[in-house]
Amino acid sequence: MISTTDTIISICYVAFIVLLGFWAGWSGKKGSNEAGEYFLAGKSLRWPMIGMALFATNISCLHLVSLAQSGFDSGLLAGNFEWMAAFTLILLALFFIPFYIRSGVATLPDFLERRYNRACRDWLAIVSVVSAIIIHIAFSFLAGGIVLETLFGINMFTSIILIAVVTGAYTIVGGLRAVVVTESVQTVVLLGGAIIITVLSWWKVGGWQPVMTVLQEQHQLSKLSMLRPAGDPDGLPWYAVFLGYPVIGIWYWCADQTIVQRVLGAKDENHARTGALFCGFIKVLPVFIFILPGLLAYVLYKQGGLDLSALQQADGKLHTKGVYSLMITKLVPPGLVGVLVAALLSGLMSQISGALNSIATLVSYDLYKRYQPAATDRQLVKWGRISAGLALLLSIGLLPLLNQYESLFNGINDVISHIAPPITCVFLLGVFWKKASAIAAQYTLWVGSILGAVVYFTGKLYPEGPLSHTPPLLVAFYLFIVCVLLQTALSLAFPMQHTTERSRLYWESPLAPLRAKGWPGLANYKVLSAALLGVMALLYWIFR
C-alpha cells in the first residue's frame, strides 16, 4: 500500500490528463464533430508528436509490468521485441508511409481496398477491431488491474472499470487530437518514471560488478545475452527472433490501425517518415529502463536486498507478475512513488486511448459508412463514439480468459503470432509485387486467419502437443510461409487487373522509395534510417 501523499499525486495526475484531453479535443480548429478533425486531427501532426505518440501507444502499463517480469525471469532476452521494432519502423518510413500519405486514406483497410478489393477491406477492418480490443485494451487493463490492486489494494475489476471510465471519457469526446496531445505528455512522464526506478535499482545493487558476481554465482550470465542458442531454456533462440519477429513486427508497426493512425494524421510525408524514425530511436530505451530493472530486481533478490515474500505462492514459486509494483513500494521513497504510479497510469491510459480512437475510426469509415455512404460527419463521429464505448465493455469481458497466462508478455506475443501472418503477407506482397492479385489476397486473409485460429486453439486444447513447445515467433514464421505460398499460387492462377490507382500503390523496384529527396541535412529520412541501422547493429554486437 502506498502513502496518502503518493495517492494524492496519482489522482492529481489523472485529473490533469483528463482535463488536458478534453481541452485538446475541444480546441480543434474545425470542432470535434468534423470527421477529419476527430479521427485524424485534421492531418496537422508534426514529427516529434508523431514519434512520441507512436511510442506511447506501443508502450503501456502492460510493457512496464511484463517487461520487468521478463527481465526478472529471463534477463534481457525480451529486449529483442523492442530493438527489432526499430528495423520495422525503418520499413514503415521507407516503404509504406509514402503510399499511406499520398493515397490520403483514413484507415489501412481503406488502403487495402484501393490495392486489392472491398472484401479485403472488410476482413481487415473486422480483424483490426478484434485485435485492438484484445491486444491493446484487454491485456492493458489486465496489467493495470494487477498494478493498482498491488499498490492501492483495490479489487482488480473495480480498478479496471475506473480506468475505463476515466480514459474513455476524454478519448471518446476528444478524438485523435486529444489522444496525441495526452500521449506526448504521457511519454515524458512514463520515461521519467522508468528512469527513476532504474537509477534507484542500480544504486541499491551497487553497480555493474555486483550484478556480474551474482549472475556468475547463479550460473545465469546468459541473462545478459540478447541472442540465445538453439535449445535455450527460455525458448527463444536467435533464429526464432530473426525469422519470426519481422512477421509480427510488420503487422504491428506497418499494418495495424492502432499504431499507424498517428502517421495517417501527419502534416506531410516528411513529418510522417521522420516521426516513425524518431520512434525507432526511442525504442532503444526500453531494454535499459523497462527490462533492466527486472534483472536488477533478480540480483537484489539473490543478494537478499529485496523481499519478495508477498509474491510467494502456495507451491513455493514466485508470482513474478507483480515484481514491478513491488519494486516501487520497496525501493522508491515516499513522494516519488506517486510519480512512478503516474508513469504506470500514463502507459495504461495512452495505450487504451489510442486503441479506442482507432476502433472508432475503423467502425465509422470501414463498416458504418459502407452501409450508409451518405452519412454526415456528425453521424460518423457519433457511431465512432458508440463503438469505442462498446469496445471497452467487450474488453472487460475478456479479462478472465486472458488472465490465465502466467506471463502477460508471452501471452500477448502468443496471440499476435497467430493473427499477424496473413496480414503481413498481403501488405508485403501488395507493396512489393506487381502481380499480387485481389482474389489471392482475399483468400489469403480468410484462409490464413482461420488457420491461425485453428493452430492457436489446438495448442491450447492439447498443451502437451508439438505446437505448445514451438516458440510463438516460429509459429508466426511457419504460418507466414504458408500464406505467401498460397497468395503467390492464387495470384498466378487469377492474375491482377490493374487500374490507374492500383498501379500507383506498389513499388516498381526496391530502390524506388529512396528517390524522394526529403528534408536537407541530418533531418533527411535516408540519413536517419542509416543512423538508426548503425545504432541497432552496434547494440546487437555488444549484447550478442
Image (cartoon, rainbow, N blue to C red):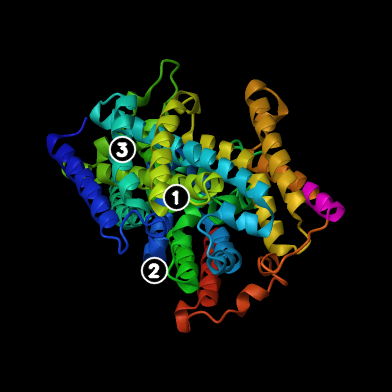
Q: Along the polypeptide, which appears first: circle 2 or circle 3?
A: 2
In space, the residues marked 3 and 1 are separated at their CA atoms by 23 Å
Magenta segment? 486-494
Q: Label 2: which residue?
A: 46
Residue extending farthest to the top is 314
Q: Position of residue 415 (x, y in %)?
A: 57, 36
Callout in the foreground (3, 1): 1
Q: Label 3: which residue?
A: 327
Q: Quadrant of the N terminus?
A: top left
Q: Secondary structure under badge 2? A: loop
In space, the residues marked 2 and 1 are separated at their CA atoms by 18 Å
State the residue in front, 75 or 339.
Answer: 339
491 inside magenta stretch: yes
Please, what is the dominant secondary structure of the magenta stretch? Answer: helix
29 displayed left or right of 250: left
Q: Which mark is residue 276?
A: none
Q: Amino acid at mark 3?
A: Met
Q: Is residue 295 visible?
A: no
Q: Label 1: which residue?
A: 58
Callout in the foreground (2, 3): 2
Q: Amino acid at mark 2?
A: Arg
Q: Along the polypeptide, which appears first: circle 3 or circle 1?
A: 1
Q: Amino acid at mark 1?
A: Asn
Q: Quadrant of the C terminus?
A: bottom right
Check contact, mark 3 vs mark 1: CB within 8 A.
Answer: no
Callout in the foreground (2, 1): 2
